[in-house]
Image (spheres, rainbow, N blue to C red):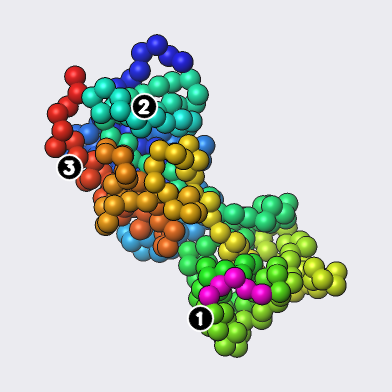
């Protein structure tokens, strides 16, 4: 561990739409923000080929390009963007109310304010064919990518409320939606189950799992297997949506920040304030409902404003 700890006014952990938007606002407020990008600079959008629903891009934009532009905008106002990952935090009472954060297990920084924008990671099935075709027809967000499959045949995996909601969303724009549920029942609420079963172009398959996603460069089909009978069946599809949940990236904050039962950070009212003064949360790490780039960016703005107001109410440590 380094002997001297760097003093930072506003530390932003994470570099998705929330983190970079927080950086833009914090930099313009002279909070001298430092962003540590994490393992996946740019966040989940770097795995998205096309973003068509973010305001200001009338012709759409690919995810990696959008994140590069957000980073450049943050840097234009003086944000210090660094490659590195927060590996430990200590939000106990440091002298002067500072928060201690360890970067890459070997560097300590002391921050007057911390904005957590570490996001959430979509859960995937782990099939090699599924991973190979991510961005080529395999997606974990029907609301984000469903538009590109308008009038086509698609499939969705999952049995909870999110899967049911996304299946009915897809059914409104796609010709046919094959819904695969691993068990002999859905976990979704009765109301959501009714929406699925009453939608004529949803083909609901219980006790069914994916054996392989078919296609070379893009998704061309799906081989399914009935986990009761072992019977396999192939169908032609152009898009596969995985809706088996997300895992918020909050492990290093356990025991220090309040979380819900799923591990999402809890914030105070409509603000981004956590239970620790001077620590704020924005983006998917605290949003399990919407999980959109534009809503993440909005909470990034809120976190920077909350941090600015917090700093204005305390004496700046020497």
Q: Callout 2 environment at 10 Å: few (<14), some (14 to 19), or many (20+)?
A: many
Residue hosting label 3: 309
User: Callout 1: 10 Å neighbours few (<14), some, many (20+)?
Assistant: few
Q: Main secondary structure of the magenta part?
A: loop
x, y percent for residue 187? 59, 70
Residue shown at 35% from the left, 46% from the top:
281
The kind of secondary structure element at disc 3 is helix
Q: Secondary structure at mark 1?
A: helix
How far is mark 3 from mark 1, CA to CA? 42 Å
* Residue depicted at 14% across the width and 29% down the height: 315
For the record, the magenta segment spans: 185-189
| Mark 3 / mark 1, whichever is N-terminal | 1
Marks 3, 1: nearer the viewer: 1
229 versus 265 height, above or below: below
Q: Which residue is mark 1?
A: 191
- Mark identifier at residue 19: none
Q: Specify which label sits upstream in the sequence, 1 or 2.
A: 2
Label 3, residues with CA under 10 Å away: few <14, some 14-19, many ≥20: few
CB atoms of marks 1 and 2 within 8 Å? no
Q: Secondary structure at mark 2?
A: strand
Residue 192 in view here: yes
Say which quarter of the image contains residue 306: top left
* Pick the front one: 250 or 132: 250
Q: CA distance from mark 1 to mark 2?
A: 46 Å
Q: Which residue is mark 2?
A: 100
């Amino acid at each position: 561990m380094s002997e001297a700890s760097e003093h930072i006014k506003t530390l932003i952990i994470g570099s998705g739409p929330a983190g970079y938007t927080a950086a833009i606002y914090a930099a313009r407020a002279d909070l001298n923000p430092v962003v540590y990008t994490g393992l996946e600079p740019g966040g989940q959008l770097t795995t998205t080929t096309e973003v068509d629903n973010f305001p200001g891009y009338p012709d759409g934009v690919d995810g990696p390009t959008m994140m590069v532009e957000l980073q450049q905008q943050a840097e234009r106002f003086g944000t210090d963007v660094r490659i590195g990952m927060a590996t430990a935090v200590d939000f106990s009472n440091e002298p002067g109310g500072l928060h201690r954060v360890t970067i890459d297990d070997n560097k300590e920084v002391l921050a007057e304010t911390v904005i957590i924008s570490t996001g959430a990671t979509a859960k995937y099935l782990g099939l090699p064919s599924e991973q190979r075709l991510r961005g080529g027809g395999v997606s974990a967000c029907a609301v984000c990518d469903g538009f590109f499959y308008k009038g086509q045949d698609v499939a969705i995996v999952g049995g909870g409320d999110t899967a049911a909601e996304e299946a009915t969303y897809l059914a409104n724009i796609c010709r046919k939606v094959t819904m695969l549920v691993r068990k002999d029942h859905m976990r979704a609420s009765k109301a959501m189950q009714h929406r699925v079963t009453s939608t004529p172009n949803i083909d609901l398959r219980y006790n069914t799992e994916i054996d392989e996603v078919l296609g070379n460069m893009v998704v061309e089909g799906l081989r399914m297997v009935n986990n009761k009978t072992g019977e396999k069946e192939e169908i032609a599809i152009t898009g596969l949506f995985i809706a088996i949940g997300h895992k918020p990236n909050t492990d290093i904050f356990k025991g220090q920040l309040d979380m819900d039962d799923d591990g999402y950070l809890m914030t105070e009212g409509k603000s981004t304030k956590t239970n620790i003064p001077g620590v704020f949360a924005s983006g998917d790490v605290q949003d399990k409902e919407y999980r959109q780039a534009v809503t993440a960016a909005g909470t990034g703005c809120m976190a920077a404003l909350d941090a600015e107001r917090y700093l204005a109410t305390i004496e700046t440590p020497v």
